[in-house]
Amino acid sequence: MEKIKVIQIGVGGFGQSWLEILRDYQQIEIVAVVDIFKQNLETAKSLLNNQSISFYQDHKQALQEKNADAAIIITPPQTHKSLAIDALEAGLFVFMEKPITKEVDDAFELYEQSKKYSKFIMISQNYRWRPEIEALRKCVREGSIGTIEYGEWNFRRATKFGGWRDQYNEILIEDMSIHHFDLMRHILGKEAKSIYAKSMRPSWSWFGGNPVVSATIDFDGDTLINYFGSWVTRGKETSWNGELKLVGSKGMVELTDDIPKITLADGTIRELKLAELPYEDRAYSIFEMVQSIRQNRKPVTHIGDNLKSFAMIGGALNSIKEGKEISIKKIE
């Protein structure tokens, strides 16, 4: 079986870790690497150590000259829209890091434009593909705790990035919360109806924008989720998944320190069995892309689906700005 040929666009710090995943994935062949900075390309050359791979500073030149199946875009969100369109124009599938774009309106425009092309755009939502998350999703979907009526989701970390993230006004919502909002949809199997959010910047924050958010989210079926997130916490941190409790008519499921548990109505508590996955995390995202191409189907996290998670981000941003509950925009 022929390998899927890819061009990776963007090999900065995070892009280099993606490059290693692609390099080691047996069904992928990297044919070109693109970055505007020469130093990043030099680092990529050392990581790959493969003379057959071409290196470019101009992505359009790479798209024109190389025979590839997919473009892997690992660049700042404000560049995603134009790069994705250029890749679609060149006849390639598109795989992008989250979020879809920096501005929510741009994401909706990209979605509409993508309908003109036969190739899909996929967004990596790697948090979905973790054994502890799949264990929770399976438990909820099987009805083990009955109808979920409310839940709590807490995320607390003290993380310093620097770079482009310091230019965001609502950095936690715009860059991190998309993971947790997407997981809510994934685990519950429901769509958000409305959101009421507030944010703030503590006096000790090293971020330029607001790194603390509190939100109340109403999902289909009258399921209410209370969300809190901080990127400048003090004391004990959560995992990147966060800590969560989902409470239903027959019991509760929870995730603490990445250990999934169920508590039944009679008080019985037990750990959930971790799911067995063919790959995990970002490697599963690549697996899903490859399988989708080979099976001629949309990936699970194609742009149309992921826009439903991103619409929650847009609703949160509008709620913070307007100081009121906002209805989540529906995706056609």
Image (tube, rainbow, N blue to C red):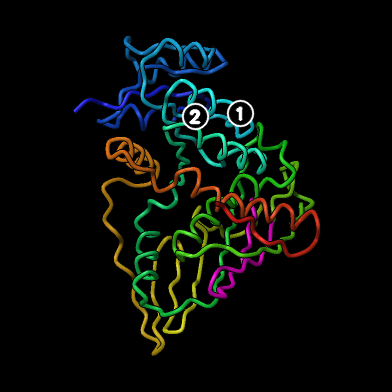
Q: Nearer the viewer, residue 218 or 260?
A: 218
Q: Residue 230 in magenta?
A: yes
Residue in front for this viewpoint, 216 or 113: 113
Q: Which residue is mark 1?
A: 79
Q: Which residue is mark 2?
A: 73
Distance between the alpha carbons at the discs numbered 2 and 1:
9 Å
Residue 309: x and y, percent? 55, 53
* Residue at horizontal 53 percent and vertical 12 percent from the top: 57
Magenta region: which residues? 213-231
Asked if residue 93 is positioned above or below residue 133 in the image, the reply reads above
Quarter occupied by the N terminus: top left
Image location (x, y in percent) of residue 111: 55, 40
Horizontal side of residue 93 vs 233, given as left or right = left
Which amino acid, mark 1? Thr
Which quadrant of the figure has residue 169?
top right
Horizontal relation, residue 313 to residue 265: left or right? right
Residue at x-position 39% and y-position 75%: 262
Please, is residue 22 above or below residue 284 in the view? above
